[in-house]
Image (cartoon, helix red, strand yellow):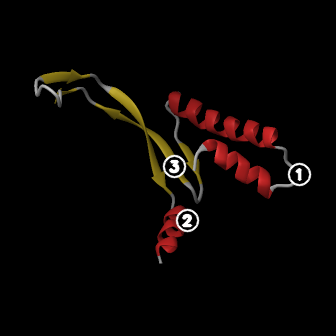
Amino acid sequence: MVKSELIEKIAAEREGMQRGDVEVVVNLILDSIGNALAAGDHVELRGFGSFTVREHNPHIGRNPKTGEPVEVAAKKVPHFKAGKLLREMVDASRA
């Protein structure tokens, strides 16, 4: 599911909400999560999961095409850990 499909699904399930209003809310939520992570904060949505930022140290990698060593700079990457309810919901769908 992509963001536009999520917006359409929510708008279809909530009769009183227009698609444009749903789009504003979804964008606001996603922007808030992104801004919090950019500021180094931790975001936790109970039952859904938590978002954190992990730091990767600089290291020497390899160019897959030529095999020669390449310096990879330090970087910060977002990390998501699913909450218990989400894990159980996904696991139950396998049965």
Q: CA distance from mark 1 to mark 3?
A: 30 Å
Indicate the secondary structure of the residue bearing disc 3: strand
Closer to us: 27 or 5: 5
Report the residue marked by disc 2: 85
What kind of element bears circle 1?
A: loop
Question: Residue 32 in the image: x percent, y percent?
Answer: 63, 34
Instruction: Look at the picture and state if 83 lies above or below 23.
Output: below
Question: How busy is the neighbourhood of tag 1: few (under 14 within 10 Å), some, or many (20 plus)?
Answer: few
What residue sits right under mark 3 in the picture? 50
Marks 2/3 in contact by CB < 8 Å: the verdict is: no
Q: CA distance from mark 1 to mark 2?
A: 28 Å
Q: Amino acid at mark 1?
A: Gly
Question: Mark 2 falls on what kind of element?
Answer: helix
- Amino acid type of the residue tagged 2 in the rendering: Leu
Reply above or below: 92 against 70.
below
Mark 2 surroundings: few (<14), some (14-19) or many (≥20) residues within 10 A: few
**First in residue order: circle 2 vs circle 3:** 3
